Amino acid sequence: MLTTRVIPCLDCRDGRVVKGIRFQGLRDAGDPVERAAAYEAQGADELVLLDVSATHEGRQHQLETVRDVRRSLGIALTCGGGVRTSEDARELLEAGADKVAVNSAAVRDPSLIATLAERFGTQCAVVAIDAARTAEGGWGVRVTGGREQTPHDAVAWAAEAERLGAGELLLTSWDRDGTQQGYDLELLEVVCARTTVPVIASGGAHSPEHMADAIHAGAHAVLAASIFHDGHTTVGTVKERLRGLGISVRAPAAATQKDQPA
Amino acid sequence: MTADTSSIRILPTGAANIASVIAALARQSAAASLVRSASDIDGAEGLILPGVGSFGHAMHTLRDAGWIEPLRERLTALRPTLCICLGHQLLSASSDESPGAIGLGIHPGHVERFDAAERAGLRVPHLGWNTVEADPSANCLEGGAAYFANSYRLLAAPAGWQAAHADYGGRFVAGLERGGVVTCQFHPELSGLYGTRLLRRWLAMVEGGVRC
């Protein structure tokens, strides 16, 4: 059966992994190549690597980082952060990304999603949405690394992104990001009810229980950063606990009889 | 494990995650280069047909490049060829994804959308790690968990091919194998150790010069 994916997220700036709270106050969290290899060895199902600098220099760093990570990485890699055009996406794919996430640029010009889906395939087009609760009780879309509010409704935008060709949604709760208070479950429920592509829950995970809650709310994959970067737990430990909570996750591969001794 | 480093060629069918395939081969000390001309298809000891994007678009790219005939000859002769994801589907006669487009037709299969899965409330694309069960007699394909990213799939294995299956709202073909031709709906280059082992076995076939 199809298992639930556990996805460590590497937010990168100037070739280093960083992590903050609600996208601010970034602190160093290690070397991306080392982190990526460690997470794969621990049983990560795929990785997300986001450039959070969103500058021209940052983009060049990002391509180098993607090339370096890809050299040793044998699982799927989604890359994003500052992707403005389908050429930006092509550069990331050529460097070693398997999927490309678009965020602010897609909000400004939704046709970018259709262009990516047409050029690289639906399964390559991930739309990342930073959703923040509004005073009216809904969720708005934030762009530019969460710094800028837009008039868009996050749930409607998720449905529109799918209609335009998104193959997957990376749904981050801006309110919960880095807080370790758990995912925004209401947001997940509402977005999953309005869409039919896989949804990755992001923002706020502190425990396997939070992840199980997200899956019960409808998420198909769970993303986390701080809990893995801080070294308090490993992907393997989290997956073992998820299994105990009745969530189907991939077991580590073992050697089989078809393998010849090296 | 070292295949002759000049002997692996990759067919660029348009945009695909070719960098990941090349990196996975490099980790097995196998250097790969892109096919530049039709003669490369016949000349390669091992050929990889990757592919993401649409069935019709990929066939169009192959046709424009004049690669369909040499590719069909190679596949029909069962020379070592690894077909990944859309590459796996291209061996079929046709696909729901691109009505009217003619596939390579190495077998008479028809590729269909995951419609039953959708009706059952499962999300499409089928994205992530799923269980693969393989015919015990297969040389290259084996059971385990593999990484998939597909909205379409082949429902039934054609006669004469060993097969692997997976389930997503119903059983579908996860891989096929006949002689040196190995096809997989999943991505070996993104399937961790499971995928690495499959690549090693296929590279060993390339090295052994399998011809059936």
Image (spheres, helix red, strand yellow):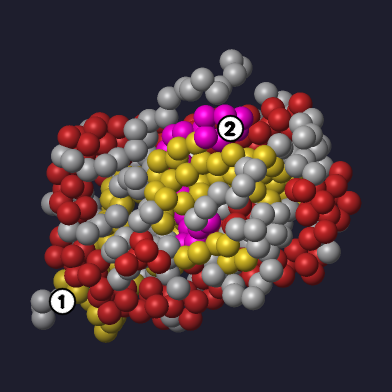
Mark 1 chain = A
Mark 2 touching mark 1, by CB under 8 A?
Answer: no
| Rendered image quadrant of residue B89 | bottom right
* Looking at the image, residue A230 lies above or below residue A52: above
Q: Is residue B142 magenta?
A: yes
Looking at the figure, which quarter contains the C terminus of chain A? top right
Query: Badge 1 is on which residue?
Result: A138
User: Which residue sits furthest front?
Assistant: B159
Residue in the image at 79% along x and 60% along y: B68
Is B38 displayed left or right of A86 in the figure?
right
Residue B207 marker: none
The amino acid pointed to by label 1 is: Gly
Q: Where residue A137 sits in the image (x, y, percent)?
A: 10, 76
At label 2, which amino acid type do we have?
Ala
Quadrant of the frame with the N terminus of chain A: top left
Judged from the image, the secondary structure of the residue bearing numbered disc 2 is: loop
Q: Position of residue A150 (x, y in %)?
A: 29, 80
Inspect this view and state whether residue A79 appears: yes
Specify the label residue B138 is tagged with: 2
Q: Nearer the viewer, residue A18 or A78?
A: A78
Whether the magenta-drawn stretch holds residue A195 is answered as: no
B21 on left or right of A208: right
What segment is highlighted magenta in the picture?
B135-154
Pointer 2 and pointer 1 on the same chain:
no
Q: Residues within 10 Å of mark 1 (few under 14, many from 20)?
A: some
Residue at horizontal 56%, vertical 49%? B157
Q: Residue B29 location in percent, x, y?
A: 68, 30
Q: Residue at x 64, y 76 (%)?
A: B100
